[in-house]
């Protein structure tokens, strides 16, 4: 009974006892007592030896790359501020709109109206040149 | 994990530090191209960040959950790129050599240049996906049978059968390449 189970364990988990289910690890010592099982163990050791040569290293920069990906960019932060998910933060887009209107008022107050009065004789002559004959004799 | 669900970046950073290397090694063993394996790792860890709320600690361990996500991403990738992978095989030194072995009658000179690692890797990639997953998860990732069964969505006895078949096939493939 144990022999069959041991064969099964060797075929499934190999020769490293730490890979075996904990409840079966005590059976490992019985392998040395049976010639057939010893042959199975040698087979398992052959595969394990080959598998152990395959060492794969992880990418050391990956952690930082992932952290950079989850951190929002400044443009994303601006977008989130302008278009918040919560109604409690609706004052943010309202304030942004108000600032734009105030800025428009400010610029509007600073701009002077263009002077349309004709102050010198050269300008008068220039404008006369554009006037029609009827305007001239009025 | 609860903190990650609430968007705590420090908590995520701690989890990332704990798991990223393990998940990356798993992806690199499942996908031949290491750059693509790195992309899959990134995607898996981003899902941890974005979908942490979906994780149920009463159903499985975080390691198991992450391995499951990564395996699904690997399968998606393999299916999506099956045609292109086949075309790109010549770029992969391992597959390029194994392909030429099948075509040329005396590949001894080429095989001499291969080390054991390449032979094992080639044999591992030749295994059916489920067998390879079972072997990698159990042998290299040191996951319990329960966890492997959960990731593969199968029973414990079926997992044991998969592992036994994987090792048997691997042995056959290794012996074949060794004889050549």
Image (tube, helix red, strand yellow):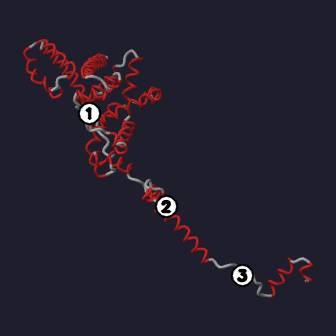
Report crowding for label 2: few under 14, some 14 to 19, many 20 or more residues within 10 A (C-alpha): some
Q: Earlier in the sequence, mark 2 or mark 3?
A: 2
Name the N-terminal-most of marks 2 and 1.
1
Under tag 2, what secondary structure? Answer: helix
Check the residue under mark 1 and report the chain it is in.
A
Quadrant of the frame with the N terminus of chain B: top left
Tell which subunit mark 3 falls on. Answer: A
Answer with left or right where residue A117 lies relative to residue A95: right
Q: Which mark is residue A55?
A: 1
Where residue A121 sits, quadrant-wise, is bottom right
- Judge if badges 2 and 1 mark residues of a common chain: yes
Image coordinates of residue B133 in percent, x first then y, are 31, 27
In which quadrant will I find the C terminus of chain B? top left
A26 or A11, nearer to the observer = A26
Q: Are marks 3 and 1 on the same chain?
A: yes
Closer to the camera: disc 2 or disc 3? Answer: 2
**Residue carrying label 3:** A115
B118, above or below B9, in the image: above
First reached walking from the N terminus: tag 3 or tag 1: 1
Q: Nearer the viewer, residue A106 or A132?
A: A106
Measure the alpha-carbon separation of dots 3 and 1. Answer: 83 Å
Please give the name of the residue rendered at 18% of the width and 19% of the height, measured from the top-left corner: A10
- Residue farthest toward the bottom in the current orientation of the protein: A120
SS state under label 3: loop
Crowd tier of the residue under label 3, counting other residues whose Cα lies within 10 Å: few below 14, some 14–19, many 20 or above:
few
Residue B22 pos. (x, y %)? 27, 38
The residue mark sitting in front, 2 or 1, is 2
Q: Which residue is mark 2?
A: A93
């Amino acid at each position: 009974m144990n022999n069959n189970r041991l064969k099964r364990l060797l075929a499934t988990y190999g020769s490293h006892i730490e890979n075996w289910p904990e409840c079966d690890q005590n059976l490992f010592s019985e392998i040395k007592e049976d010639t057939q099982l010893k042959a199975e163990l040698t087979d398992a050791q052959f595969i394990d030896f080959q598998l152990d040569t395959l060492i794969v290293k992880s990418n050391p920069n990956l952690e930082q790359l992932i952290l950079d990906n989850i951190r929002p960019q400044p443009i994303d932060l601006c977008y989130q501020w302008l278009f918040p998910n919560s109604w409690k933060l609706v004052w943010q887009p309202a304030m942004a709109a108000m600032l734009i209107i105030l800025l428009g008022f400010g610029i509007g107050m600073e701009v002077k109206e263009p002077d349309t009065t004709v102050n010198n004789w050269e300008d008068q002559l220039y404008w006369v040149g554009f006037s029609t004959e009827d305007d001239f004799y009025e | 994990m609860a903190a990650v669900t609430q968007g705590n970046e420090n908590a995520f950073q701690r989890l990332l530090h704990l798991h990223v290397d393990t998940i990356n090694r798993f992806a690199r063993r499942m996908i031949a191209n290491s750059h693509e394996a790195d992309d899959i790792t990134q995607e898996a860890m981003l899902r941890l960040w974005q979908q942490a709320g979906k994780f149920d600690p009463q159903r499985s361990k975080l390691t198991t959950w992450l391995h499951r996500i990564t395996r699904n991403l690997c399968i998606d990738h393999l299916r999506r790129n099956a045609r292109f992978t086949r075309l790109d095989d010549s770029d992969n030194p391992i597959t390029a050599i194994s392909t030429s072995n099948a075509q040329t009658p005396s590949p001894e000179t080429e095989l001499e240049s291969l080390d054991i690692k390449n032979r094992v890797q080639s044999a591992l990639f030749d295994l059916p996906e489920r067998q390879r997953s079972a072997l990698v998860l159990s042998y290299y990732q040191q996951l319990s049978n329960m966890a492997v069964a959960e990731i593969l969505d199968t029973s414990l006895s079926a997992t044991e059968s998969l592992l036994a078949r994987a090792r048997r096939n691997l042995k056959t493939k290794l012996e074949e390449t060794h004889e050549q």
